[in-house]
Image (cartoon, rainbow, N blue to C red):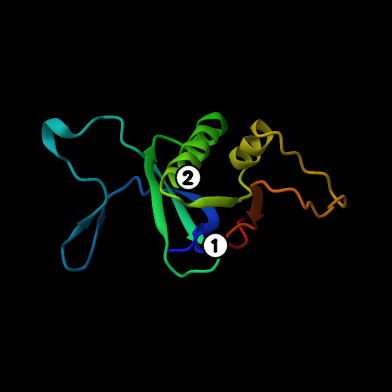
Amino acid sequence: MDTFSCHGDLLFDEIKLSEHLNVKAAGDIEGFVDLGDYTTSNHKDHGMVVLFQPYTRSWTQIPGILASKGNVQAATLAKIIVECTVLAKRACLYVGSVTCDGASWNRSMWRIFGIHVLYNTFKPDAADGAKLVSHTQHGVEK
């Protein structure tokens, strides 16, 4: 594969997992599963996926899927993004931007990387380097 096709975006998103059991009409149980001695009392209640998407191709690569108790804090999130970027580089994938939602812990992660939001002061930057992109929330929350 040519180098041009290996440039892309590192995307990550986190979700809160269900904390209850649900019995479906067919009698199936959804939710946490008791694995006896292998089930800890500290269930993970959040999941996060990190995905690499090339700019010019339709395939994707997942460098990380993580589970945590509570949302991943900004300092840990920054380390995860750096680690996934390094893993991508080792696989000859080049991260040109990082995309996430505007959650408070994600904005805190930006500050760790030295990125601060200044409204109405956007100037195009011709220098090479990764960019951070924030997308809006997934709909209106009440």
Between 41 and 105, the residue placed more toward the observer is 105
- Per the image, the residue denoted by label 1 is 4
Residue 99 appears in the rendering: no
Please state if 59 lies on the left or on the right of 85 as rendered.
left
| Lower sequence index among marks 1 and 2 | 1
Residue 60 image point, x, y percent: 42, 61
Q: Three-letter amino acid code at disc 2?
A: Lys
The residue shown at (87%, 52%) is: 120
- Per the image, the residue denoted by label 2 is 89
Compared with 32, 43 (above or below) is: above
Q: Three-letter amino acid code at disc 1?
A: Phe
Q: Residues within 10 Å of mark 2 (few under 14, many from 20)?
A: few
Name the residue at the right extreme.
120
* Residue 115 numbered mark, or none: none
Residue 72 image point, x, y percent: 48, 36
Between 79 and 142, the residue placed more toward the observer is 79
Residue 89 appears in the rendering: yes
Residue 127 image point, x, y percent: 75, 48
Q: CA distance from mark 1 to mark 2?
A: 14 Å
Please state if 125 lies on the left or on the right of 111 as rendered.
right
Task: Answer with the quarter of the image where residue 137 lies.
Answer: bottom right
| Secondary structure beneath label 2 | helix
Please state if 126 lies on the left or on the right of 76 as rendered.
right
Task: Answer with the quarter of the image where residue 28 lies.
Answer: bottom left
Q: Residues within 10 Å of mark 1 (few under 14, many from 20)?
A: few
Between 50 and 61, the residue placed more toward the observer is 61
Residue 37 image point, x, y percent: 12, 30
